[in-house]
Image (cartoon, rainbow, N blue to C red):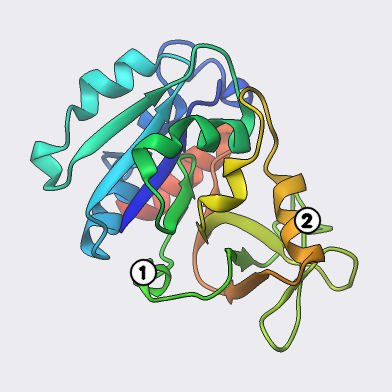
Amino acid sequence: MKAMILAAGYGKRMRPLTDHTPKPLLQAGGKALIEYHIEALRDAGIESLVINTGWLGEKLVAFLGEGARYGIPLVYSHEGTPLETAGGIKRALPLLGDQPFVLINGDIWTDFDLTRLVDNRPDPVHLVLVNNPEHHPKGDFHLTDAGRLRDNAEPKLTYAGIGRFDPAIFAQLPNGEAKLAPVLRAAMADDAASGEHHAGQWWDIGTPERLAELDRLLSGT
């Protein structure tokens, strides 16, 4: 099974830290954020990783290489202009193949057990949801008791930026910029989206202050 790490964003809210460093290479606990994902995906049984690049993407490639020191092959999908999440996935489909893949945002940190996504999931979309953080109190999607995702029901939880996807749902998108939310909502409308609630650690590293707080947690200071 393959996985994709989303690492092409500008990281504008993290400036000035991201003026010269791509956001996934920012460090917490003595390690780059993206390295936590690479190691966790490897340990979960993922065979190879696709990483999309945009802002300062050449620094990602120079730092991570082809994955030899992590024990998992890394390949890159380079984006000349920002494509948004679904557009970036569409661009990377030739590298991902035709089997379901795991997707994870490069700017989060979590203790979610990624082996749960390697197990067979029958739905084209399966998302991990978390409790709503203070900066996103209204949440994104409703999770039913049966584990189905709904767009127009309450209460809502927050999409964690972690999921398992069938590449076929992106295949018909036009090339170019495309957001992920409409793809997810279309799957929910067709009752083709399942989900699960992760109540453990999850950090959206959207500000320098949250990065510093995570660093203190992981450093034990």
Q: Residue at x 60, y 75 (%)?
A: 197
Residue 153 in sight: yes
Helix, strand or loop for disc 1? helix
Q: Residue at x 72, y 88 (%)?
A: 145
Disc 1 crowd rating (10 Å Cα; few below 14, some 14-19, many 20+) is some
Q: Residue at x 80, y 57 (%)?
A: 137
Q: Amino acid type of disc 1? A: Val
In the rendered structure, the answer to whether residue 1 lies left or right of residue 217 reads left
| Nearest the eye: 2 or 21 | 2
In the rendered structure, the answer to whether residue 130 lies left or right of residue 29 reads right
Residue bearing mark 1 = 118
- Quarter that holds the N terminus: bottom left
| Nearest the eye: 186 or 43 | 186
Q: Residue at x 9, y 38 (%)?
A: 68
Q: Position of residue 105 (x, y in %)?
A: 50, 44
Residue bearing mark 2 = 185
Q: How many marks?
A: 2
Disc 2 crowd rating (10 Å Cα; few below 14, some 14-19, many 20+) is some
